Amino acid sequence: MVGGSGGSVTVGELLLGRLHDLGVRHVFGVPGDYAMDFIDQIMTFDGIDWIGSSSEFNAGCSADGYARVAGVGAIVTQFGVGELSTMNALAGAMAESVPIVSVVGGPMLEVMRQRTSIHHSLADGDSERWIRMAREVTVAQASLTPECALQEIDRVLAECWSQQRPVYIRIPGDVAIAPVSRPSRRFTRPNPVVLPAQLDAFAAAAQRLLAGAERPALLVGNLPIRLGLGAAVAALANERNWPIATQMLGRGLVDETDPHYIGIYNGAESSAPVREVVEGADVLVCLGTTFFDWNGLFTAELDPARIINLRRDGAVVGGTCFAPVSMAAALDRLHEMAASRSVGWPSAALLHDPPEIDRASTDPIRQERLWSAVQDVLRPGDILVSEVGTAFFGAATMRLPAGTTVLAAPIWSLAGYTTPAAFGAGIAAPDRRVVSITGDGGIQISPQEISRMFVFDQHPIIFVVNNGGYSSERALEKAVGEETQAYTQIPDWRYSEIPAVFAPEGTFVAHVARTEAELAGILAGVDGRTDRLTLIEVIVDPTDLPPGLPQWSQEASAFIYHAQFPAPASLPWGGLG
């Protein structure tokens, strides 16, 4: 938007133009005095809309949800007090590989040079403290001056796109309005770096490993989603007859109704047929996978010597790394050389729908039946957002319709992520339906963003699973034989009445379901895209856990409580890297 021949623009306009070139169309944030000069420029900039958030924490989570759908996100906060509130969300984006540009409105240059004691600081004159903190949760940082603005903006945005991770830009108030020369060309997203000799060497090594392989398989993580490789992965699987398993991180990349999709792999927590295919593969191709304690790091029976591991900018064959090689280029070469799999796999046995809800039962709702009911609500093309804990494990039991985008953050496991992330996803894709599943603990952290959903006329379906507290902590206590402590309980809110705090009657529908019949009756009226926000509170027994959570708690408790814990079954302690 800012580019051409001659003339000048302000540094703020320059930054906005480069953000627009990167793909940003909305900016989430909270106004503050240090940031107001730049926010004023956003309000008049053609092509980027300001989306006010209820808090900086929520703004960060909204930008994360937005970026997972739109490709890149942005937040604007102010120096010190504002930017620190976003760091929790930025750490999640760093862990989950989500590109977000964090723009911080800062004090004037001279104020910082003179080490002035100012508000929103520790009154010690150190204005660089927050940038030092940001270095831990972002891959590139810059503090702009008129002299360095163009070079530094382009450098930082290039790193954001190349590494698919968050970055940090501070723009002092006087710098935001300072004039600079209009750039002669637009910013362009950098292409992946590929060294042909390294790509050829990778292909030769992969060919040797694949020679004679009869049972190759694919295991998908989250990076192929960020890099837009879904069609390429599906083409390899379909044309070469390879089965595809996903980590929870990788759900949404492939069509789960495709016969080549076999389910979720989580080490020992996986179903036996999925383990048989993944761990029994004579060559396993891992695409952007991340192994950590929640998804099988300690129990995965995988031999690194027979793994082809495709990273963002490198490829590893049997422990030997070839770089720089982009994931897309390596995947193309694999597709060319891969032989068709002649050995079948028991696909009919791999995916089982959970037990259906009893539409006539007056029994309390059980977790084992709840998730089939939620699954029946989903439609092709929906955006599914699930909270850490109960909702995360429950969603793992569902088979998703074609075209479903999944937003979940299991690595960072940030409670309160779901509601603001669902709002951000709705801003990114206003024509798609958002289905959000949170818990009572999660929604108590960030319910305010429901008010923003009303402001932007969003009509999500919000499930609130009310089990009276923190189920993950209860599961951990049970795993080590301890009694449930009071800290796992939380005050019981009237969750179905939350929308009434933010909007007048008639703009939403809210329900409470205590029995299977009540839930079935409520869901019978939810079909397709609703014309109002719909909140459904589902009350379940506090001791009832979704499938997978008890198994996870057994493994996690051994590690967390310092019991005798074996080394990883096959993988290095740090995963595949």
Image: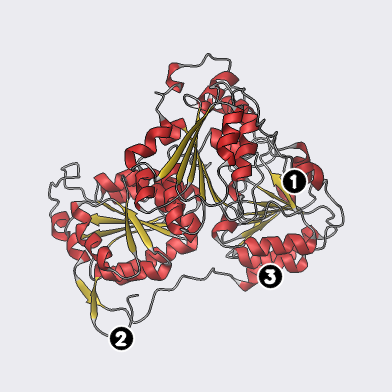
What residue sits 34% from the left and 82% below the top?
A: 184
Give the x, y percent position of residue 504: 33, 42
Above-or-below relation of 468 to 245 = above
Give the distance between the C-alpha atoms of the residues marked 1 and 3, in whole angstroms.
Answer: 27 Å
Mark sitting on residue 5:
2
Give the x, y percent position of residue 317: 69, 57
- Label 3 crowd bin: few (<14), some (14–19), many (20+), radius 10 Å: some
Mark sitting on residue 200:
3
- Label 1 crowd bin: few (<14), some (14–19), many (20+), radius 10 Å: many
Q: Nearer the viewer, residue 398 or 432?
A: 432
Amino acid bearing label 1: Val
What residue sits 73% from the left and 55% below the top?
A: 258
Does dot 2 land on a helix, a strand or a loop?
loop
Does dot 3 land on a helix, a strand or a loop?
helix
Q: Nearer the viewer, residue 236 or 91?
A: 236
Q: Of the residues tagged 2 and 3, which is closer to the observer?
A: 2
Amino acid bearing label 2: Ser
- In which quadrant will I find the N terminus? bottom left
Mark sitting on residue 278:
1
In this rendering, position of residue 143 left or right of residue 219: left
